[in-house]
Image (tube, helix red, strand yellow):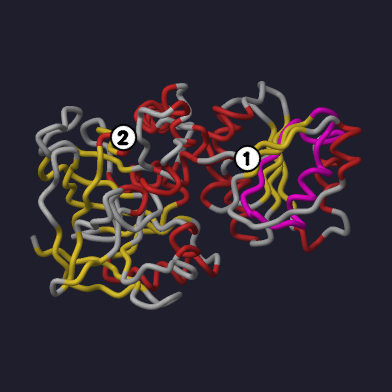
Amino acid sequence: MRIQAALVETLGGPFTLRDVDIEEPRPDEILVRIAAAGICHTDLGTRQVWPRLPMVFGHEGAGVVEAVGDAVTTVAPGDHVCLSYRSCGACGQCAAGYRSYCEAGIGALNAAGARPDGSTGLSRDGAPVFGNFFGQSSFATYALAHESNTVKLPAGFPAVLAAPLGCGVQTGAGTVLNVLRPRPGETLAVFGAGGVGLSAVMAAVAEGCSVVAVEPVASRRAVARELGAAAVIDPAAVDDVAAAVRDATDGGAHCAVDTTGRSAVVSQAVGALRQRGTLALVGIGERAEFDVMTVLTKGVSIRGVIEGDAVPSEFIPRLIELHGQGRLPVERLITEFPFADIEAAARAASSGEVIKPVLTFG
């Protein structure tokens, strides 16, 4: 079938709309007509280094099931769905309930640019087009997905709100609700108030916690305040960010989330914690340095987190329930862009002009 997809054709190049062909779903696959797709910084960062081109990114898709393979039992044509990351369901981590740490997940199933057998399901003029990003590649009018990363939505839930739940909101909220699990009245410091960080803010406020958001962009600090943060800090306006957080949290935060992946910010987050505090690292980065004696003497725990330790089929319905209760107002983060304006949306996200761009498909 002929579809339209946003291709990255050169390393670090722009998203360019092209006509491509997509295969019929294999027995274990689901063909989804995409109605909305969130743009995540993972999409933007990965296109700068991705070696297999041309490539279709996109991993926060939502839409309607068009067709299913013979082995698919969890969804049917006509179902409205949200797409997330893919997992095998059979390895030790999946069996233990930690699907985001699937032993095949990061490589073969989510970040190979192809199916495990090397095929892609996408082509242009007979030449392969790489895809299968997070088991979906949803920067396209249609995407091939799988049972492990396809979650049926309740009737009437908007695709524009559903799309960010598949990664960014799931990561931020899941880090708070599934990993840190602060008790009511405890304090959380969030470093970076983008889509992931503000999702963490919303989840912590919903749990009755006091939140401090550290963010250089004034408009994002304002949104953090509106979402219930007790205090916001401009890191450029203080001499010592860690000390400013400790002052705002009566001696240090019980827990912290770093969404930046930057060494200096990770060090600040460690210093902002109180005794036996916990830091969750969710931002993509390379190396970080921090004071070992601070970690030792405070008994600080540092925990890496992928996708909020969430199992999509279980956690996305929980997020939708929180939204229905008014405790997770995801719409406050979203700016809509037509699919044709994907490159403009990407620029707006990179500059900090918008928090969570969501592409809409007519």
Vertical relation: 58 (above or below) 345: above
Q: Residue at 84%, 40% (x, y): give it.
A: 246
Tell me where residue 219 appears, x and y as whole percent. 60, 59
Q: Is residue 317 left or right of residue 326?
A: left
For the residue labelled by badge 1, is the local secondary structure a helix, a strand or a loop?
strand
Q: Earlier in the sequence, mark 2 or mark 1?
A: 2
Q: Label for residue 304? A: 1
Vertical relation: 97 (above or below) 119: above
Disc 1 crowd, CA 10 A, few/some/many (<14, 14-19, 20+): some
> Would you name the residue on which mark 2 appears?
148
Q: Is residue 348 left or right of residue 290?
A: left
Tell me where residue 232 appears, x and y as whole percent. 71, 49
Nearer the observer, 216 or 225: 216
**Count of labels shown?**
2
User: Disc 2 marks which amino acid?
Assistant: Ser
Vertical relation: 66 (above or below) 53: above
Q: Is residue 114 left or right of residue 121?
A: right
Q: Residue at 19%, 55% (x, y): give it.
A: 142
Name the quadrant of the C terminus: bottom left
Residues shaded magenta: 250-276
Q: Is residue 317 left or right of residue 248?
A: left
Rounded to the nearest angstrom, the CA distance separating label 2 from label 1 is 22 Å
Tell me where residue 106 appears, x and y as whole percent. 45, 46
Q: Residue at 10%, 43% (x, y): give it.
A: 67
